[in-house]
Amino acid sequence: MLRSRVPAEAKEKPYKFILVGKPTDDSGFGGAAFASEDLASEEEANRGAVQVPDPFLKRVLTEASKKVLELADERNVRIGFKDLGAGGISCATSEMADAGGFGAKLYLDRVNLADGRYSPEVISCSETQERYCLAVPDEIVADVLKIYNEDFELPHLYHGAGAVVIGEVIKEPVYTIESGGRLVCKAPVNVITTGISYDREAKPRVRRFEEPELKGTKMLREDFLKIISSPNIASKNYVYRMYDSEVQGRAVLRPGEADAGVIAPIDGKSVGLAFSVDGNPFYGLIDPYQGGALAVCEAARNVASVGAVPSAITDCLNYGNPEIEEVFWEFKEGVRGVGDACRKIGLLTEEGYPIPVVSGNVSFYNQGKSGKAIPPSPIIACVGVLDDWSVSRSIGFKDEGDVLYLVGEPLDELGGGEYYRTVLGTFGGNVPKADFIRERRQIESVIEMHRLGWIKAAHDISSGGILTAITEMAIGQDPSNGLGFVLDLAELAPTGLEPEKILFSETGAFIVELPAGMEREVLALCARNRVRLYRLGEINSFPRLEVIDGSERLAIWELEELRTAYDSGCRDIFGVPAGR
Amino acid sequence: MKRNFSRKVAVIQFPGVNCEYETARAIRTVGLEVGLFRWNEDPAVLDDAVAIVLPGGFSYQDRIRAGVVAAKDRVMDKVSELAAAGMPVLGICNGAQVLVESGFVPGLQWESVELALAPNIMEDRSGYYCRWVYSRLEETRTAWTGSFSEGAVIPIPIAHAEGRFVTENEKVLKAMKENGQIVLRYCDSTGVVDGSFPANPNGSMDNIAAACNREGNVVAMMPHPERATWLRQVPENLPDEWGRRRRKGAGNIDLLEGEGPGRKFFTSLLERLKQGGVL
């Protein structure tokens, strides 16, 4: 494994630091200062703080770096390798040195610069993208430089780009930088790499959220068309088409085809990887703890929907100004929610271990000059692992006669949800309460059904509830099949909820499509795993969706009108029909 | 170290291409050997190759316009020489843009640029567009399409911002039609070519999705056959036989690793090389 540190071999032989990539400029300098500015229209003033990525150069660098790794392998030498991120050169080199138990001596005059004159602190700390730092033994330095500068012609492909030796590894744990013959930095290396901690006050934010009066299902037909075309629910195809979801040729399920994207990463192997990203700011607004917890639950459910075991998450935590006590409280609550969910859902493959949080990103000060912060918005990305990617299915209905089951149960949890906001124009108060044990059992059950090869389609319940989930499954089918469904609320009568609460509750659960005649097996599996199961009915061959309550019809839609509403829902945001 | 391309298909790696590895895998899947050629290596080593593929991506960052810088690269002189001698050459997406900018396709006059791959024209949107589309096979005579049946309807993904075939003038289009140089046309799932979006996803003239030189050994195609080489790659909800096959294959890795709708572009090459006694 390639590590981001100076190898232990540097005790026996001299090692150099090589900087490779884009010429260093002042982009991204002061990223930390930017993070403490309120969002406003001073974009120009802050441009220097923004990093400027270049995927072209990154691609060439990646190809060249692969050759460098091959070279190190052939010559049997160990090297260190690190991407330059926050803090630029000074951060990468000090961290590599410290992680290996060494020090470093750097010469800024050797750094290849973009056109312009930069002060030593800019050169050493700017966050110019597409740069890497390598620690390599002297014996291969010339060959490494040749791969980057001659074989892959970096200086010819990008003005000022290339690989240069910028310093050396030293045994004393001291970090020095020279510039213009002057010593501009000298410190014990661990002083540089150790973080600074703040003491911040937290105070609960008091807000009142109340449950609304229900209005019944008389207008269900129109109300649901509003929900299915609301930007939070509607098709995001307009966006998906802007990105290459096929490159590398490994796609099994693409964005929009299922709750998670799936790839088959290794030739000739059945192992699959599933990816999902999720977050709902309205839950966090009502209850910041649930906001964090539910984001993890949903991301985990999403990968389980395609049969993958939730195996790691990364987070992107977006909050207002942490110097405000209520905002810092929201942040603490969100982090607590994320942590609890990871610990209590846990790794299904290692009893007693949490789902690891392998990396993360925190964005504070998300508020305008008015001081109004964004709602607490933790975003969670989850990676799931499949033993066999071939069990992953799209959410679309597959065949007439197949049976839809609800794995889980709707509770009186519509707060922050789509029905309250879009139809009743309020947030409500009963935000879903993350029940980690229930989530874990449901996730385990659905993954087990996948492994047994039962599942022909699966979709998790989230924004918009059961009716939205079933509709998305109907829309996701091969359009030439024209399959439909009749949802009978009588099947869900044991929940004791009002019809609209059954239809739109956002309690975490799954809808699965299984072949006919499996009732006994499914029931046994769910009983064994102690999860609720409801048989919802059979897929029919009429291209319609219908909601009935026993003998009473509450609403009926043609599949085509649902598809049109779903496809065009993002028109107001994107200014275009979003479906194709 | 002398590179050896004997009996191999050479995949050219310009700086910024990003489809070289899956393209190589797709070619290997039909039983051909592959070598990667870095753009600035000695072009003479390509003399031994059996065919050349220019894969998709963003060669030279699409500077000036897509494909135009790579078209002037030294290696393209060698490709020109080998193509003129009859070697099969396939350009996929960015590779197609390079072949068009080099004047190899349609090649009515010697290396004169008579065709362009212009920015997409679509309904309600512009720019880059990634989606599965349908194309109809119009020419089985080329080195890359012999294994298909004439008129075959092929679902296949596109992913480009500049894929609209435009000819220099009406005469060029007429000549291309007369010479049988239009290899693929965009169509709907039933094979009907009607020219409207989204069946024609980029406004391409005469619905052209792929074109070839007069001889048919050099083909420039905007869709990506390497992204339709395995059944696994096909979306489950395609409204056709391939969609049904994909759904039937669920749970069966061997079936899903089997043939996808675009593999025949590479099988065709293998057949052609065998027929020609090259392999």
Image: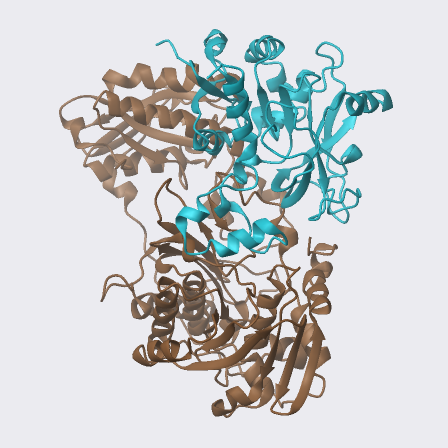
Chain colours: A brown, B cyan
Q: Is residue B97 visible?
A: yes
Q: Please state the horizontal and vertical placement of residue A42, each as a whole percent of the image.
A: 63, 48
Q: Residue furthest left?
A: A12
Apparent side of residue A169 relative to residue A39 in the rendered image (left or right): left
**In terms of depth relative to the viewer, which is nearer, A49 or B94?**
B94
Is B158 on the left-hand or right-hand side of B273?
A: right
Please tell me which residue is depicted at 66% across the width and 70% down the height of the picture.
Answer: A228
Residue A260, relative to residue A182: is it above or below? below
Against A494, residue A173 (above or below) is above
Q: Is residue A280 above or below residue B44?
A: below
Q: Position of residue A490 (x, y in %)?
A: 55, 90
Residue A95's x, y, as percent? 29, 39
Q: Please identify the quarter of the rendering in which residue A148 is found.
A: top left
Image label count = 0
Q: Is residue A32 left or right of residue B71?
A: left
Q: Toward the viewer: A69 or B2? A: B2
A218 or A82: nearer the viewer: A218
**Quadrant location of residue A16?**
top left
- Report the side of A146 relative to B197 (left or right): left
Q: Is residue B200 above or below residue A440?
A: above
Q: Residue at x 21, y 23 (%)?
A: A76
Residue at 73%, 60% in the rendered image = A572
x 50%, y 28%: residue: A57
User: Residue A96, percent across and down?
Assistant: 28, 36
**Placement of the N terminus of chain A among the 4 image quadrants:** top left
